[in-house]
Image (cartoon, rainbow, N blue to C red):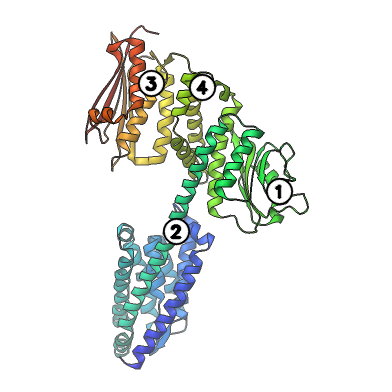
Amino acid sequence: MSDVHGKIILGLINSLSLMCVIAFLLSNTAPFQRTMYGDSQSKWGKVFLALVFGLFGILGTYHGFPVEGAIANSRAVAVVAAGLLGGPAVGIGAGLIAGVHRYAIDIGGFTALACGLSTVLGGVVGALMHPIFLKARSRWAVGFWATVLAETLQMTIIILMARPFTAAISLVEKIGLPMILLNALGVAVFVLIHATIYKSREQEAAYQSELALKIAQKTLPILRQGYNEDTAERACQIIIQEARVDAVALTMYDKIVAHVGQGADHHVAGCEVQTRLTINVLEGGLPAVAQTAGEIACNHPGCPLQAAIIVPLFSRDKVMGALKLYRTKQHSITAVERRLAEGLASLFSAQLELAEKDLQEKLLAGAELRALQAQINPHFLFNALNTVVSFCRTQPETARRLLLHLADFLRISFVNNPDIVPLSKELQHVEAYLEIEKARFGHKLAVLYDLRAEDFPLPPLILQPLVENAVRHGILPHSKGGELRIVASSDTFGHTVTISDSGVGFEISQVVASGQGIGLKNVDTRLRSLYGPSFGLSISSQVGQGTVCTVRIPRGVA
């Protein structure tokens, strides 16, 4: 290896090292993470990423190593990585920014046009490899070979376009192999950095979801007893213990309902709200994060609270109070605490909706209703609320619609139901449940209705358990999801409702032997006790083909 090759390799390694360090530091900033690792990228988000990667490409040019009137550089690392990670718009945008800059600046003159054009093509190569990159297991390998292709194209373009020809050949002989291999290695490292940060965010999100679910499971039984100083304080005690924040507070309108932790000496239940930030949240109806005591603006001198996330609580689109998580250290509120607060606020808002209608007392009215209440799955309730939260910013109208469906579902589930309801009301309950599940699982769940029956009477809470069983145990375990069909019809003798799914199916004998299917058994028992042995629940299922549940109601029975 000649001295020139050694200097080129050393120069490229220095350039790549600098770019990787800056990339790592930038990737850990909140604005870049929100744009790069978010669920979706907006138009301006893509512009932002194209600009960032384009500037990285320019940095690679300036930090290059002069060789025979040209520059051995790491510019391709930025533009290829932009296309792989951000897609066509980001890759081509970054390539144009770095490529036009390379052509326009007064360095490396005789290869300026060739290098500028090849830089744009590097972004195109990354963009074309983007779909393959997303599906690949070893994404770093895709990044490596995509860069090999992009840099090989660059060397070819230099030979074809740069003049004099002999100088172009001499240049490629010196910089070709080092740039191809080292820049390919640089993109592989860049991709690994991206994967590491993305994985850490997934782990953080998983921890937050697990924590929120744990808190929800513990607070639900308490909040079902009503929203008052006693239940609010108990809920706050659970949150502060599990979330390990320094203080937790709940308000009702502008009054403190409970405050647990630091600052409890002057943030006292029954008193008016002490912080300006909380008042702003109550007035504006939007969450707020404060990272300093000045932003919280507590009117008590010496208040230890230094950072906070405050989220409004709603009932029927009206702000009814706020949930507040506090820290005693400045700049200590993280994205984990923000998502946790938003998820819990949605849960508490649903409870406020129920409390306003005085449903809590009715839930405790009898043993049967207490049993129905116990059947409400906390996992479903929290997942439903988490789904609503995920739509709040991007699709607020969808979030509002889902929250109304959830309120309908809870209202029908918890209310002191009459012995008999019309089919239309029972289907409202089913539809509310399915709208939430369709929002969660998207294309995995398709629902078809075929309603040709009269609006006949039937017992309440008969169809929803069958639909939930079909979704949870039939369709969702299937790798491709499936279709749920609800068919209602009437004839001379009675009425029939059939709920069928194209899910995984099951062996009925095994379900009975294992003690599962309690919900199905309860439906069958209620039907037979009301209408006789000929009108119970009929089930047929085949593994791999799906399940059909049929409910038969005699005509003329009310």
Is tag 4's residue or tag 2's residue first in the polypeptide sequence?
A: 2
Q: Amino acid at mark 4?
A: Val
SS at badge 1 = loop
Residue at horizontal 42 percent and vertical 39 percent from the top: 439
- Mark 1 → mark 4, Cα distance in angstroms: 39 Å
Above or below for 463 versus 42: above
Q: Quadrant of the N terminus?
A: bottom left
Identify residue for label 3. 462
Name which quarter of the figure residue 158 lies in: bottom left
Q: Amino acid at mark 3?
A: Ile
Circles 1 and 4: CB distance less than 8 Å?
A: no
- Mark 4 → mark 3, Cα distance in angstroms: 15 Å
Identify residue for label 1. 263
SS at badge 4 = loop
Q: Position of residue 67 (x, y in %)?
A: 39, 88
Identify residue for label 2. 200
- Mark 1 → mark 3, Cα distance in angstroms: 50 Å
Q: Decide if residue 313 is on the left or right side of residue 483.
A: right
Residue at horizontal 67 percent and vertical 42 percent from the top: 259
Is residue 298 among the parts visible in the rendering?
yes
- Mark 2 → mark 1, Cα distance in angstroms: 33 Å
Is tag 3's residue or tag 2's residue first in the polypeptide sequence?
A: 2
Q: Amino acid at mark 1?
A: Gly
Is tag 2's residue or tag 1's residue first in the polypeptide sequence?
A: 2
Residue closest to the eye, 254 or 2 = 254
Which mark, by number, is residue 415? 4
